[in-house]
Amino acid sequence: MAEPQTFTAVVVALIGLAGAALANIDRIYAVVRQVLSRGTSDATQGGGQWTGLFREFRQSTGQEEISEESVVLEVSGTKVTGRITSMRGQQRIRDFEGQLKFDFLIFSFFAADAGRVGAASMVLKGQVESGLLLGYWLGFDPELGKMVTAPYVLTREKNVEAAKAQHKEWLAQPGYAAK
């Protein structure tokens, strides 16, 4: 049988170890998650380069057009951050943050450019592994001075014209309040 002093020392050490583990549970969880996710690239978790397609009203032409933007996602667990950069017309860069849970990607941003202040949110559904999420964006259009909404496509397809043709029906859905 162990001597009482040795037994007491072991119990005190175990209590100290348990206390240290509980105090650092967030760090331990992060390390375990990192180890378990090895071999899974950011791209398979939804991160990386995407193309966004959406309908918008162009004040200059008085028409709705399908516009495209480059979307870079960074995914860490369920948290998503990234940057949207317009691909033509007005140069717009938007940093956003959101969540990716249960096949839903929800993110939002605020924007303040010269004379243009706006905000928008996207709610998209799909499996990121498939390279396609469909949904809607809702935001304040500073050119129109009101809230608008439109269908939105987030795709890994690099050929923008092919993506527009493939998702033409989705992008034609009602939703824009330009008039």
Image (spheres, rainbow, N blue to C red):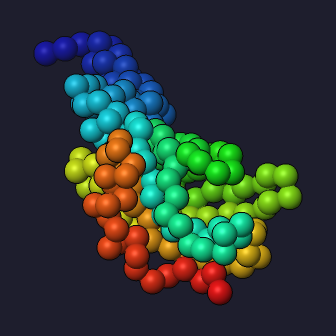
Q: Is residue 107 above or below residue 123?
A: above
**Residue 101 visible to an observer of this rendering:** no
**Residue 67 visible to an observer of this rendering:** yes
Image location of residue 17, percent across then percent down? 38, 24
Q: How many marks?
A: 0
The quadrant the N terminus occupies is top left
Q: Is residue 41 left or right of residue 161?
A: left
Image location of residue 75, percent across then percent down? 42, 41
Going 29% across and 12% down the picture, which residue do you hit? Answer: 6
Furthest toward the front, the residue is 61
Furthest toward the bottom, the residue is 179
Image location of residue 38, percent across then percent down? 26, 25
Q: In this view of the protein, which residue sits in the foreground, 110 or 57?
A: 57
Furthest toward the right, the residue is 115
Q: Is residue 105 above or below residue 50?
A: below
Going 50% across and 53% down the picture, which residue do you hit? Answer: 68
Going 63% across and 56% down the picture, which residue do you hit? Answer: 109
Q: Is residue 28 above or below residue 169?
A: above
Going 49% across and 63% down the picture, which residue do you hit? Answer: 66
Q: Quadrant of residue 126?
A: bottom left
Image location of residue 157, percent across then percent down? 32, 46
